[in-house]
Amino acid sequence: MVADMAAATVTSKGQITLPKSVRERLGVGAGDRVEFVESGKGFLVVPATGDIRLLKGMVPKPKKPVSIEEMNEAIAKMGRTR
């Protein structure tokens, strides 16, 4: 799938207007909130009130499966370092 390009200009007040095509794809309108989520490749624009299924695919799958024990060890390690 080839993504369509859309652009917006930042005003002197730091505001942008989302292009109509972007608003339609996100399903947002006047008064709706959007969130800017930082990812490894930049930022994602996500409707704050949208369907949770829109987030699918944002985080890449791990290269190898992680066991519950490994998860617990990582959590415990983080707790010790804080």
Image (cartoon, rainbow, N blue to C red):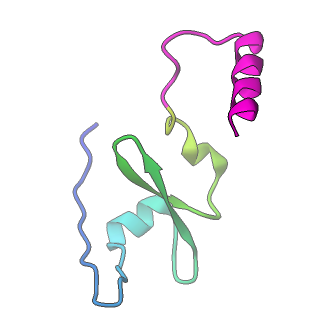
Q: Which image quarter: residue 66?
A: top right
**Residue at the (65%, 64%) spot, across then down:** 49
- Residue 3 against residue 63 in the figure, above or below: below
Please identify the dominant SS of the magenta region.
helix
Q: Which image quarter: residue 50?
A: bottom right
Asked whether residue 11 is drawn in magenta, I would say: no
Q: How many marks?
A: 0
The N terminus - image quarter: top left
Relative placement, left or right, of 51 versus 35 is right
- Residue 40 in the image: state x and y as whole percent: 39, 40
- Residue 73 against residue 34 in the figure, above or below: above
Write the start and end of the magenta stretch as one range: 60-82
- Residue 2 in the image: state x and y as whole percent: 24, 41
- Residue 47 against residue 2 in the figure, above or below: below
**Residue at the (24%, 53%) spot, across then down:** 4
**Residue at the (33%, 66%) spot, across then down:** 21
Asked whether residue 62 is drawn in magenta, I would say: yes
- Residue 55 against residue 43 in the figure, above or below: above
Q: Outermost residue toward the bottom? A: 13
User: Of residues 64 and 58, which is closer to you in this image?
Assistant: 64
Q: Which image quarter: residue 76?
A: top right
- Residue 60 in the image: state x and y as whole percent: 48, 28
User: Of residues 69 and 78, which is closer to you in this image?
Assistant: 78
